[in-house]
Amino acid sequence: MLLSRKFLTAFACAGLAACVSAQAPVTQPPAQAAAGEPFSIAANPLAAQAGLNVLKRGGSAVDAAIAIQAMLSLVEPQSSGVGGGAFMTYFDAKTDKITVYDGREVAPAQAASTMFLDASGKPLPFDTAVVSGRATGVPGAVKMLGLAHDEHGKLPWGSLFGDAERAADQGFIVSPRLERMIHADYAENHAPDVIAYFSKPGGGLLHAGDRLVNKPYAEFLRRLAAQGPAALYSGSTAAKIVARTHAEPLAGSMTMADLANYKPIKREPVCGRYRVYMLCAPPPPASGVGLIELMQILENTDIAARGPNDPQAWYLFAEASRLMYADRDRYVGDPAFVNVPVAGLIDRAYARQRAALIGPVAGPPPPAGNPQLALLTGIDATLEPTGTSHLIVRDAEGNVACMTTTVESLFGTGRMVDGFFLNNQLTDFSFSPTDDQGRPVANAVAAGKRPRSSMTPAILLTTDGKFAGAFGSAGGNAIIAYVAKNIVASIDWNEPMRQALAEPNLVARGPNFQGEVDKFSPAILEGLRQRGIDLRPGQGEDSGVTAVLIRNGSIDGGADPRREGVVLTIPR
């Protein structure tokens, strides 16, 4: 039976043991580990184990992240893969320097601002656009990981894909979560490639406990190991990507030159103070600036003193979120194409001004503010579906790779090449290049442009610049709220990470107040209603936070209980 979108989030993994391949069992160790111990955290046990195996061989955090991504592309194809993009926030333990590696997809050179409009100039229905050839951006994750490996890898590139190759070649056991995605009722589930890949030889779709073999992906990984990133960006795989995106409906315009010319970008992080920490995350086109703005708005409230059992705390979180999203949606886009007022958005005086707008009762959606150096832009209408995965790795030298990776929504466009799905990342652009008043929007489509991303792989530093923690999540535009909730719960409310991760989610953006209604107490829900917030169930794949925080000389880490993730460590 197919599951509708609105019911998809109501299910959780039936049990960790059922989520793990029979040939590679892993166990969840204690969440507390010595602060110097290497660890691997990912949203799937097989992926976390692949990362840990690399660390055991003396690999670096980046080496392990590559192994994790290769495995995620196989065992969690609904969320991320080598056909998608990623942002990595990297902490160098020797220099205490943070570098952001931008592997965001880009629009092909022939992309047009009207590519997601119909013949009458109206935006295409999302379910039409998401499975189209136009939805796929030039993949960035593999070249980004190649650049990071050039600079921070210890083991040979070709030695990092063995676990994923074997799992693809021999097969892995379908987990309950993957089963739910296979049997969901998204537009992508009806794509021919999705149906063909997940169908049993005798008919019907795969279920949890079935073995899924992916020989084409195993062969691709062998070429990727031998040839490096060129295996994807040139040759037979590149030609197949171009052909698959040119297929109807709504053929795209990607060329071999687009793939060959893709370049990842090294960026400086955007950083701002929160409590006793420095919080750093990727700058635009990612949404680190939104996360920092939200945390600084909350710092001007008494949310920390109230705690999770006070409806006023959740009210403050919701109203601060709406203020942040109004700004993020209005101003953030690809900085190569639009002026993003980053400094103004994270200015502490501006945060105080925004916090002062929080009244006793929720009102209409707040408009965007006017941060310093902001230029007038149109009101954005980007949809940003849910999806994505997040991982955190720390190696024996203390280097940390905090990476959010995605093919966008469920199975990307549903189009497959060499055993992996192609992203639908270009649907992260605003379908309309202008707003109702004719003003250009910051996140409009343009050739060579990177769509705005909600991804916020964040790293915390102590006042003397040492690693203090890391956070990140899946979840489309809700990512910022998911990460912020866990920062509040673990730092402000001083909850152990697993407890913080289990706290209910609340996402407030514009007129919409969505959350895990069944996880909030009746008193909280009634208190929110008295303050003008009628919380409704959320949509999409739900959160997928992984997080660590240094507490009293130990690492307090966890993976979101809503998914299948684990924390694996190497005891010293």
Image (cartoon, helix red, strand yellow):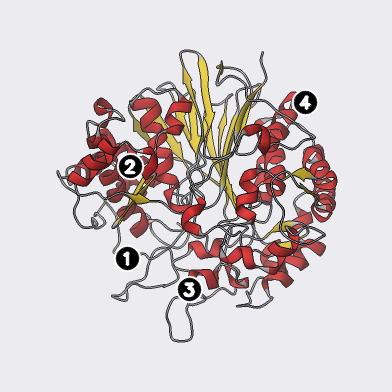
- Precedes in sequence: disc 3 or disc 1: 3
- Is disc 4 placed on a helix, strand or loop? loop
The span from disc 3 to disc 1 (Cα, nearest Å) is 19 Å
Q: Earlier in the sequence, mark 3 or mark 2?
A: 3
Give the percent coordinates (x, y) of residue 121.
43, 83
Give amino acid for label 3: Pro
Q: Earlier in the sequence, mark 3 or mark 4?
A: 4
Label 3: which secondary element: loop
Which quarter of the image is occupied by the N terminus? bottom right
Quarter occupied by residue 401? top right
- Mark identifier at residue 57: 4
The image's mark for residue 125 is 3
Amino acid of disc 4: Arg
Q: In this rendering, which labeled residue sits more in front, label 3 or label 1? A: 3
Name the image quarter holding the C terminus: top right
Mark 2: amino acid: Leu
Q: Which residue is mark 2?
A: 294
The residue sitting at 44% across, 76% down in the picture is: 123
Residue 138 lies, in percent from the top left, at 63, 62
Q: Position of residue 552 (x, y in %)?
A: 46, 13
Q: Which residue occupies 59% across, 35% down?
A: 565
Q: Using residue 245 as the reference point, say whether residue 309 is left or right of it.
A: left
